[in-house]
Amino acid sequence: MKDNLLESLNTPQREAVELTEGPLIIVAGAGSGKTKVITHRIANIIRLHLAKPDNILALTFTNKAAREMKTRISSLLDSSEVKGLWIGTFHSNFAKLLRIHAKTIGYTQDFTIYDSDDVEKIIKVLLLEIGLTPKEIGTKAIQGRISFLKNKLISSQAFSQEAKNYLDDVVSKIFLKYEEKLFKNNAMDFDDLLVKPIELFKKEESILKQYQEKFKYLMVDEYQDTNYAQYMVIKMLSEKNKNICVVGDDSQSIYSWRGADIENILRFEKDYHDSKLIKLNQNYRCTKSILAAANSVISKNKNQIKKELTTENENGEKIIFSQLENEIIEGVRVAQIIRELKLKYGWKNSDFAVFYRTNYQSRSFEDGLRQNGIPYRIYGGVSFYKRKEIKDVTAYLRLITNFSDEESLSRIINYPPRGIGDVTLSKVILKAREENLQVFDILSKPASFGFSERASLAIKEFYDVFHYLVEISKKCSVVEVIEKLYEKTKWIEYLKREESVESNSKILNLEEFLSFATYFSKNKMQEDEVLSLQSFLQEVLLASDLEEADDENKVSLMTIHSAKGLEFPVVFVVGLEDGLFPLSVETHKELEEERRLFYVAITRAKKRLFLSMAKSRNKYGNFQQTLRSRFIGDLDMGVVCLENGLPLSELFYEEKERNRIVRNGTSTEEIKKPVWMESDFELRRLRKKIRGLNILPDSDAEKLSSVEIRIGMSVSHRIFGTGKVIAINGEADEQTALIMFKNAGPALFLAQYVSSNEPFNSLETICKWASDLGFLAIQIPSWDARLIDLKKASESRAYCDEIAATVARYGMEISELSTHLQGQLVAVHPAYSELFSAFVPEKIKNDFSAWQKWSTEQLIFAAKASRLLNLKAHATFSGSLAWPYIYPWPQRPYALVDEAFSELARRWLPILNKFDEVGVDLCYEIHPSEDLHDGVTYEMFLDKVKNHKRACLLFDPSHFVLQCLDYLAYLDHYQERIKMFHVKDAEFRPNGKQGVYGGYQNWENRNGRFRSLGDGQVDFKAIFSKLAQYDFDGWAVLEWECCIKDAEIGAREGAEFIKKNIIKVTERTFDDFSGNHFLNKQSIKKVLGL
């Protein structure tokens, strides 16, 4: 026993430790050392011989907290003084008690504990039994309702008398059957571990008195998180001795959605009239600035035990509040700050945590961290013990200890697969009931009960393995049983045969489970205990809060609820927007809990705290303006500043000004309007489905009976102007056409969007998606077979009409096809062949000489397909023979470049001639990585192909920004050759470390990089003006390659951006506004007086 037990305690802590008798409530503020007080108090009671270790019951909410308490108490006392302590979670301690007295309430000591997945499975079956399906009434809803009722100590029988509506009636029926099922299976759920002790104590008062005598001291951690059942069992046990000590903080009560009732801690002094209250107000975690912010926030709550935390720590840096444009930028900025602080202070990744209100917010921060090469973990994600293979192993082990457990049997009788289906299992169970036998009596002799030879063999195989495992479990250790389980079922071999990433992961998980069993078994041996299979299963089932290793050097991402009890040197609290945080403000009670949650988030930070919000957020596919969280106004203005160093109070000038405007009667509609609103594009009104096609309403259609109508035909209209026929319906005089009238955009290049995921995995679904965003056309990457079969399109007009009709179904058309990847392969430098091999078919991947032939063939297919689709232009790349020699060192031979361009021309001329045959312009995208990368190289190529009229250009200004080229002057030089336009933005910000070449950095780290429209340096107003000036009649096609924003966001914003920038040239000038503008010759003479 240590002599200096009380030396390290401050005055209130010491008072709490030394006050051993009578009811005591310790209100322990965040970071005030509550665990230290609890453990020292227990050690002090034992040291003073006021009770033996097994006369002390200490209840926690997590296994982690229980383990930490045990470890700390062991360090304060000699090992002989701590053996027998009842320290654990509510569930583990009362499970231990129930196993001792299980027979009293009709169970055996080997009862099974069902987790939530087991419960859900039972409820699904019970729904079917009463003629309903999980689709009609959600199993989770019923499961939650039953759990709520149990924790309110409302029995299934009592609730059946109270059911008031249809849902209550269904829940009542399921609840009754559910309780019967559990009892029959000799099983309890987690809620029963709290409810059954109360039933036990009420049924047998002698047992209650036994434990009231036994537990002379009762300690409860996190008392603010207790529910009604926990409150009642604590009250029952403490009724005699009154030596109850509860520790908690009402300011950290954040689990009402799990049944926690803050009133339990608030009314403690009323429940225990002679109780003492001690407040632990000294914080050992946070800086003064962080603590000042926390105090100012929580002081706004009315329903609380008044307190104010203090600290002797340094003042620390001011808290920084940032307002970012959207959640994507917010995610990137957090990553940038982490990177900066690591460089400045040498902090590790594990020193940082990002807290958000709801799980769905994590994506933007994951993206931001990935882009910056910062490893992270999602804290509190899917538990190891929830993974299928682990649940399967535990089902085997549970069945070994409890033959009545039909849920475990149904889970594993056919896993690994052995040919026993659900029908066979149902027959086994039914036969057992008919014969009044145990299920395993049937399994041991299946042939005797009428099962087929095939079914009997499969059943017997399972039984023999299982019987062997049962027998060895009687004499072998838990570890040996698991090893034999893997061996006899050939589980690992089965997974190895699958040869997949998933199966390998499952093998690692099974091995880790065995490692855990070994570790746990050794710990038990050190405590002079033998690890039984039953106690091991209980540990597994109650271990849902196990975390990853603390030394894992990763940034932690988590919800604020998951952050409770943790601390980090640097914390980011993100998404501080009304409607998100606070999330629910329907009642004052809910608002106060949200404020407590904010308080918890703030008090996790030790050194630095960053707060942020997104000014607009993607909700249900739309960007909507957000409102700053009201909690920002609760902060102490003196300890918070903006990222630019200005005081936080600067932000509130805007609100004052808005209030002034409202008082003056001015509308604030413009202030509240979302940043992005979906527009109704002109062609929305054309969508009317008739016989599978989009057909113009009759009132808007013009009869074209004098000519043969066909898809692709150009037509004109007196109101709408020129257009193209994209769909036809009807015959003869009743024939009508859907006409897409000329509009320069917006169109979308699909190369960056097509994928294996919905809605990007088929032409049909991606068209619907693009159309819903407001695009009027799509540019199709011809190398992706999910969108087009290029060879088939080059041979079949019917197939091309089918593609056009699919696109037209969503009010769109095809702007162009693209062969960017195939074009590069026309001229690949041999040194780079390995890098381009992914773009060629598997059969020629290792035959470099065949690449040019294949790519030429692809370009010719594209020319023919473009003609059949009635397209005017086609996009491609030139390839790169000379590009590796762009910088002349060692000095290149004089003839090298000339010969390279001659060869380039030889390869392209046959292709250009084919495009000329079909009347389609071939447009080379001027690109920094191609031989045709600026005006000079284009002219060199043009010279070699004899100014071929089809050797045209695709204009993409982003590539000019990255090369410091004047894109407006380029338009002046080559406007006659420019037939296609990619609307793509970029920025180039040279510095002392990086220039045009980018220093081999990834795109997100280059000073020259692509950006979403409007976020870069391209002057699109000037470009669209120039194009209008030169009467450019092609499409404005969005190409998205931003390294910051999400691609879908880029597409949505891009459609609106292009629409706003398109310039429609007027057909009437100032001169036209006079009614006398057009006069005949005689009238003109009259005006002149001739």
Image (cartoon, rainbow, N blue to C red):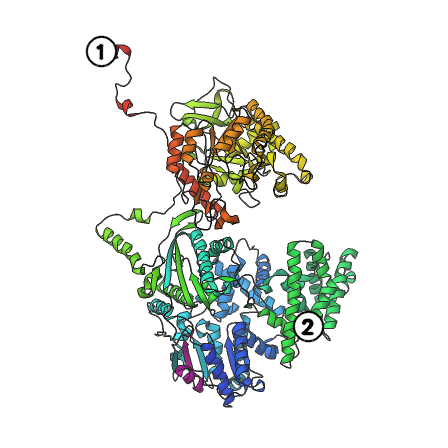
Q: Is residue 796 above or below residue 24?
A: above
Residue extent of the magenta highlight: 3-31
In the rendered structure, find residue 1086 and report the number of the disc placed on it: 1
Q: Is residue 688 left or right of residue 417?
A: left
Across and down, in percent, residue 335 comes to: 46, 57
Q: Is residue 947 above or below residue 830?
A: above
Q: Is residue 889 left or right of residue 600?
A: right
Q: Secondary structure at mark 2?
A: helix
Is residue 354 visible in the rendered image? The answer is no
Q: Few, some or many C-alpha atoms within 10 Å of disc 2 (few <14, some 14-19, many ≥20)?
A: many
8 in magenta? yes
684 in magenta? no
Q: Report which residue position mark 2 lands on.
A: 478
Q: Few, some or many C-alpha atoms within 10 Å of disc 1 (few <14, some 14-19, many ≥20)?
A: few
How many tags in the picture? Answer: 2
Across and down, in percent, residue 958 comes to: 45, 40
Across and down, in percent, residue 989 comes to: 42, 47
The three-letter amino acid code for the residue at tag 1 is: Lys
Is residue 161 visible in the rendered image? The answer is yes
In the rendered structure, find residue 787 and report the number of the disc placed on it: none
Q: Nearer the viewer, residue 892 or 1054?
A: 892
| Residue lying farthest to the bottom in this orientation | 49
Marks 2 and 1, the one that precedes in the sequence: 2
Q: CA distance from mark 2 to mark 1?
A: 115 Å
The three-letter amino acid code for the residue at tag 2 is: Val
Across and down, in percent, residue 517 comes to: 65, 71
- Residue 718 occupies quadrant: top left
Q: Is residue 450 above or below residue 860?
A: below
Q: Residue at x 35, y 74 (%)?
A: 308
